[in-house]
Image (cartoon, rainbow, N blue to C red):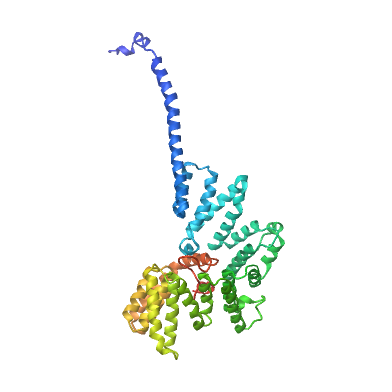
Amino acid sequence: MKIHKRSLPETRKRLKLNWRLLGFSLLAVAVVGPSLYFLHRSQMGRVAGVMKERAKSFEEQGDWRQSAFAIERLLLLEPDNREEKVRLAEVLDKSVDNDQTKDSFNRLNRIIAAQARALGICEVDASMKDKEPQIRKRMMERLSQVGRYEDAMDQIAKLAGPNIDGYLMKWLALARFSMALENRNHSFTDSTQISIPDWLYSASTLHVIDLLLKSIIDNPGDIDISTAIAESCLGDPAFLAKSQLESLTPQELRDRAISVMDKMLASNRENLDAWLAHYSIASRIDKVRAESDIRQALSMAPEDVTVLREAGSHFMDRGLNDSRGTDIGKKEERLELAQKYLSKALKKGLKRDGKVYLGLGEVAFSRGDFEAAVKYWEDGARVAAAPTAPLWFRLAQAWAGKKDLKQMRETLKSMDESIRVESPMLNKRVRSQSTESPVSNGQRTTPCKGTLSEQRNT
């Protein structure tokens, strides 16, 4: 058997360690390793600096979403940066306006989570303690917007001081009002009751209507509180049981609703929100009187999509009623205005608003154009946001009028399916609308002809 030379003992004795190569290698590792580390750290520092500058630049431009995105990327590089976490909560909150909350439920919950993290930092970091009250206030408002009223009330308890705070009284009243409409109730826990001031505890035990009446005293002319009181006056009388308004007659309640809204409007005559809120109540009592409100809103914001929608719906209702009344001569004129305003609202962006399609279909149907009416209703049922059931139901009525039973059955099946699919979505939406400002810049959510209680019934 042949043995390889390297396996011989004398050959193994000649193998030696290359100390020079080993030393050079260790020296290279000792020099290159830290150099690469500090180079990487320097590069990350420069990237972080760029992200900070970019976030600041977007913030100065008012582009809050891009600013929030830049801060989030920065936090991937600096996950322990407390200051930026607090800043992210502030910027994210500004990235969603009140008028967007209908379609921003998930984004609102994301904002709330960021605010909760920021509050945790503010509570332990004395240098950021001054930011805690404002972040907590905004978190309380956002919790109300997504229907988490119990959590909102807990934040109110943490914000409350020894003296009566009209701002907190307002949000407590709105939270309890919204919960009452949903047959929900919440009271402060025994441990919380010990720490909260007496005025807040007393307010939390009042009847919700009495709390609203007390809140309007501390917040005279407030649009939200005034609208809530007026809606209560025009709603189910059982809602007023055991309150200060229980003994009023239906006519006295209607007078009270108009009186509250008139006082609110007197304090906010330059505010478009106030005019639309006043219209939302007046139109349920006297459509003729309410027309002055909608014309004023049109003069203040002729291109506002919600003003256009409400104006179109108003003139459509007046036109259809004229066909059954004594003012027949103005029917076509008002239907023409309805067509004009609703078409303009659709063109300017309300392409997923079922109310617009429903109104345009009604105008076409009243003029005898059955095909155009059906097309509007079918288009709306296909693309509009929930609820689409009213559009399907109107289609079923139209086909029933034509005695087309096959089309009517298919339509009713589609309506049934839409109700099944959309019910969970509607629950979220109603909660998010319950304590929003009735209107805000851009696309408003004024509960005209669709008050909070009516939305829930729908």
Q: Is residue 371 depicted above or below 429 in this figure?
A: below
Q: Left of 10 or right of it: where is 168?
A: right
Q: Is residue 408 depicted above or below 112 in this figure?
A: below
439 or 148, which is in the foreground? 439
Can you say which quadrant of the picture contains the N terminus?
top left
Question: Given the current orientation, which residue lies at the most extreme left position?
Answer: 2
271 or 162, which is in the foreground? 271
Report the residue at 42% width, 80% height from top.
316
Q: Left of 341 or right of it: where is 122?
A: right
Q: Is residue 276 depicted above or below 432 in this figure?
A: below
Residue 362 in sight here? no
Total numbered labels placed on residues in the image: 0
Report the residue at 55% width, 44% height from top.
82
Q: Left of 1 or right of it: where is 110?
A: right
Residue 378, x across and y down, in percent: 35, 73
Question: Given the current orientation, which residue lies at the most extreme bottom position?
Answer: 326
314 or 295, which is in the foreground? 295
Report the residue at 52% width, 80% height from top.
284
Image quadrant assignment for residue 4: top left
444 or 3, which is in the foreground? 444
Residue 330, x across and y down, in percent: 41, 86
Residue 68, x across and y down, in percent: 47, 51
Q: Is residue 371 depicted above or below 437 in this figure?
A: below
Residue 422 in sight here? yes
Image quadrant assignment for residue 367: bottom left
Residue 45, x across and y down, in percent: 46, 38
